[in-house]
């Protein structure tokens, strides 16, 4: 069906529906033979808190199964998964993930400006960010290159 539709990229996610992880990885492995796979780790359910070691375990398994990138779940509101209900980054979680998963293999969902700035400062201007509203793309790109007050000083020679 994916090939018939001419798709070149697919996302495999269990954030909205329950799929045993081994089955999810099986889908990733099968699809990766034909298309670029992005997989999503985390839950859209705010009550479902995943400990850092489990995030790492899931991300590693999905990358090994053939996913090109793993998406760190946050929802459109940026208030679950890698964020607290207030939208604040779960910094310990992010830092721990980065000790085991290559930064260039993660797409951090960051719908809020403060979240975007956090990842730009932590990982640099080429960090992979997702869940960006269409009307926020140009402001984000300006922020990436230091043309906004939030990141202007990131690029000044000290």
Image (cartoon, rainbow, N blue to C red):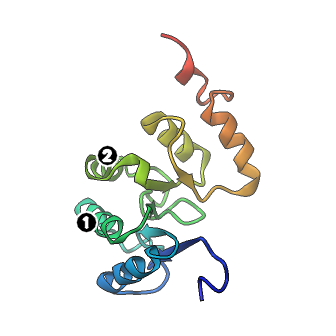
In front here: 23 or 87?
Answer: 23
Disc 2 is placed on an element classified as helix
Residue 123, image x, y percentages? 44, 38
Residue 148, image x, y percentages? 67, 29
**Disc number for residue 57:** 1
Q: Residue furthest bottom?
A: 1
Q: Residue furthest top?
A: 158
Question: Label 2: few (<14), some or many (≥20) within 10 Å?
Answer: few
Residue 97, image x, y percentages? 31, 53
Residue 154, image x, y percentages? 53, 24
Displayed quadrant of residue 113: top right
Q: Residue at x 66, y 42 (%)?
A: 140
Q: Quadrant of the N terminus?
A: bottom right
Q: Residue at x 63, y 30 (%)?
A: 145
Q: Is residue 106 left or right of residue 141?
A: left
Q: Residue at x 38, y 52 (%)?
A: 90
Q: Is residue 102 left or right of residue 69?
A: left
Displayed quadrant of residue 29: bottom left
Task: Give the residue at mark 2.
Answer: 95
Question: Label 1: few (<14), some or many (≥20) within 10 Å?
Answer: few
The correct choice, above or below, for 61 with respect to 144 in the image is below
Q: Is residue 85 left or right of residue 66?
A: right
Disc 1 is placed on an element classified as helix
The correct choice, above or below, for 17 with respect to 108 in the image is below
**Disc number for residue 73:** none
Q: Residue furthest right?
A: 135
In front here: 98 or 28?
Answer: 28
Q: CA distance from mark 1 to mark 2?
A: 15 Å
Displayed quadrant of residue 116: top right
The residue mark sitting in front, 1 or 2, is 1
Q: Is residue 2 left or right of residue 81?
A: right
């Amino acid at each position: 069906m994916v090939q018939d539709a001419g798709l070149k990229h697919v996302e495999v996610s269990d954030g909205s529906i329950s799929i045993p992880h081994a089955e999810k990885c099986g889908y990733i492995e099968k699809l990766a033979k034909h298309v670029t796979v992005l997989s999503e780790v985390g839950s859209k359910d705010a009550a479902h808190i995943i400990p850092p070691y489990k995030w790492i375990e899931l991300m590693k398994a999905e990358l090994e199964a053939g996913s090109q990138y793993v998406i760190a779940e946050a929802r459109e509101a940026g208030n679950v998964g890698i964020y607290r209900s207030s939208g604040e980054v779960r910094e310990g979680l992010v830092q721990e993930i980065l000790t085991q998963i290559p930064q260039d293999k993660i797409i951090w969902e960051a719908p809020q400006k403060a979240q975007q700035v956090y990842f730009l400062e932590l990982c640099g201007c080429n960090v992979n960010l997702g869940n960006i509203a269409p009307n926020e793309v140009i402001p984000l790109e300006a922020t990436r290159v230091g043309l906004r007050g939030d990141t202007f000083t990131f690029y000044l020679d000290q």
